[in-house]
Image: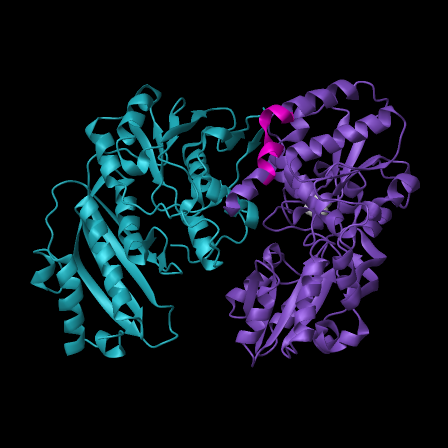
Amino acid sequence: MNELQLKDLYDGFRDPKTIRMLAKEIEELAKGLDETLNIMEVCGGHTHTIMKYGLPQLLPANIAFIHGPGCPVCIMPKERIDHAIALAKMENTILLTLGDMIRVPGSKTSLAVERAAGHDIRALYTPMDALKIAKENPDKKVVFFAIGFETTTPMTSAVIKHTVDQGIKNLFFHINHVLVPPAVDAIMADGKAKINAFIGPSHVSVITGAKIYASLPEDYNTPVAVSGFEPVDVLQGILMMVRQKLEGRAELEIQYTRAVTMEGNLKAQQLNDTYMRPRAHFRWRGIGDIPDSALELRPEYDYLDAEKLFADILPTEPIDDHKLCICGTILKGLAKPMDCKVFGKACTPNSPLGSCMVSSEGSCNAYYRYAGVLG
Amino acid sequence: MKSVQLSHGGGGEETNTLINDLFYRYFENDILIKAEDAAVLEVKKKIAFTTDSFTVSPIVFNGGDIGKLSIAGTVNDLAMMGARPLYLSSAFMIEEGLSYDTLKQIVESMAKELAKSGAKIVCGDTKVVPRGSLDKIFINTAGIGEIEQEDISVSNLEQGDVIMASRDVGRHGATILMEREGLDISSDLQSDCETLWPAVEGLIKEDIAVHSLRDATRGGLSAVLNEWAQASDICIEVEEDSVGISDQVRGICEMFGFEAMDLANEGTFILAVASEDAEKALQVLRQYHFCENASVIGTVSEKYPSKVVLHSAHGTSRFLDLPKGELLPRIC
Ligand code: SF4
């Protein structure tokens, strides 16, 4: 029964005819644009859709994409990956985290290497499994290295809630949840970035409400579309922004009306507020230090906070990417991955030197895999 | 006897009971029951020889178990070289405490699977290890087959060859994933685990010009196509829409962010066939129940040597990469 519903959810939004029709319509309308529309996808999920469905091949040259900060794994600075490794190496400890995090190299090794060396490191499909693992291993310290943008924060909050409510004594949290809008502000701050339109992710907005992007049109005079992740969604979002440009509007529009509202999920927002608060600073890999751009546990929950409890073993020195890495400039749309001297040579997906090569959602990685293909 | 004990692997009386009651009974053939130190075999043609170890978790899954897998896996490796599977060895590594009934079920399904190709188990070994040294049971099988058709090789693809898949892809991987996650969203999703030799034999008998065969196990369809493209230095162009993917597999992929073309199969093979024989090959394949949805999925060209290109129905193209990242461990 269930899989039918799942299928219904995406089927129409990948329909080849609809995709082609929308692309045609955009092409027609875009003829009237007086400047190139440089759209930043704020979220790596959109980068994935755009590359996977080859949307640039369908769109005219004056619709360009500038891939944004990417994914929660890409923006993790090396010193925090080193945190995860240090925690995993503690005696009698199980380290839990999500998917790609395992593979990404820190300053010396990666979680994958440490796991092969015998440390108990596990990738979760869902954060809720952390509770089960903690209960099954009462004599071990279980540390959940939590990562994610706004979407996944409520899931971590829910795990924290259960840990508190059930009095689980051996589950600790290392919080790396980050907030997208401050990062966008940081990219736009010096006024040099070429970006003049934004596509915002619907899944973030389902939780936070589209309101978190409300300031973008005002601050930067750009159209913003909050859109879903299927190719039809993305194209509809682009169409909305092209229309705005033509009509001289700069507004926040919601393409993904299937679930996004302006206000978002207030319950989830409350849950986050109960356990977390903004962190004074967070260093984004590829962008740098951004105030109020991430979350941390509230002081009431210090007793769950791995960053505080195990502070003495966690490295504090910031570790920057390779000197030659130009991810920051690429993020502003001022350079392309090919402009980097080490692109595809010293820097490849298997040994990334900078953040945008790390996961499939980063722009260097996407170019590495798709460049050269297909006119 | 309720469970397997350390003494069953000790080489004494208990070991003999296990061998007689289980292995000889189900695998019975004149070479095996001679119980010599080594099996003596007679082979007249060129032979193919392969080995594989099986560690799947869970050991029993929808559509098969580790026993079926351990036979189909090795027999298929032989079949993919155009070799008729003849003789297999089987080595069991069993964790102390495994239920005897489970072991019996595994051995039974091995015997059933052997019957499909006519291959025989002619030698074997059993070790029982203390609890905790391994998870339930690991099986190794090695196999020898007589080559019935030569020159089937990963480096034999030619311009103009037609690429076919014997059925829809991704079932085994999706089934294991679903079972591990305790999901029961689609109870009709079954592993494709199956002995492929009968279909390969059919193709050989009909003299189809097969250039390469490969079962799409770990790494799935993506891995096979990329290996071919690289080994033969050709370009494989695939029509995305013509690759069969069941709704259930699609659903699982959607949920976990996997690509169906990257997921493992255990009874699905990919063929590169000379274009003039393509139609006939399809007709032959479709006579077998496990290939009834065989279809053409692409062609060999010279466009981007060593690369696989996917063409979408909406008119774009992209490279299909080798799967990366955390593939599911212990899937076969
Ligand atoms: S190629 Fe590597 S080093 Fe160069 S900008 Fe991209 S990520 Fe940085």
Residue B273 image-quadrant placement: top left
* Picture quadrant of ligand 1: top right
Question: Where is residue A306 shown, x and y percent of the image?
Answer: 70, 73
Residue under the image location 22 percent in, 26 percent down: B207
> Which residue is at 20% across, 62% downward?
B124
| x then y, percent, for residue B44 | 11, 42
Instruction: Note the chain letter of the purple one.
Output: A
Q: Which residues are magenta?
A: A9-19
Task: Name which quarter of the figure residue A59 lies in.
Answer: top right
Q: Nearer the viewer, residue A277 or A268?
A: A268
Q: Colour of chain B?
A: cyan
Q: Magenta: predominant secondary structure element?
A: helix
**A200 horizontally vs B143: left or right:** right
Q: Which colour scheme appears in the figure? A: by chain
Q: Is residue A164 above or below residue A368?
A: below
Q: Is residue A120 above or below residue A226?
A: below
Q: Is residue A64 visible?
A: no
Residue A17 belongs to the span the image colors magenta? yes
Question: Is residue B26 shown in magenta?
Answer: no
Q: Residue, x 83% and y 22% (percent of image)? A: A33
Instruction: State left or right for residue B30 relative to residue A223.
Output: left
Q: Looking at the image, which residue is at 40% across and 47% down?
A: B188
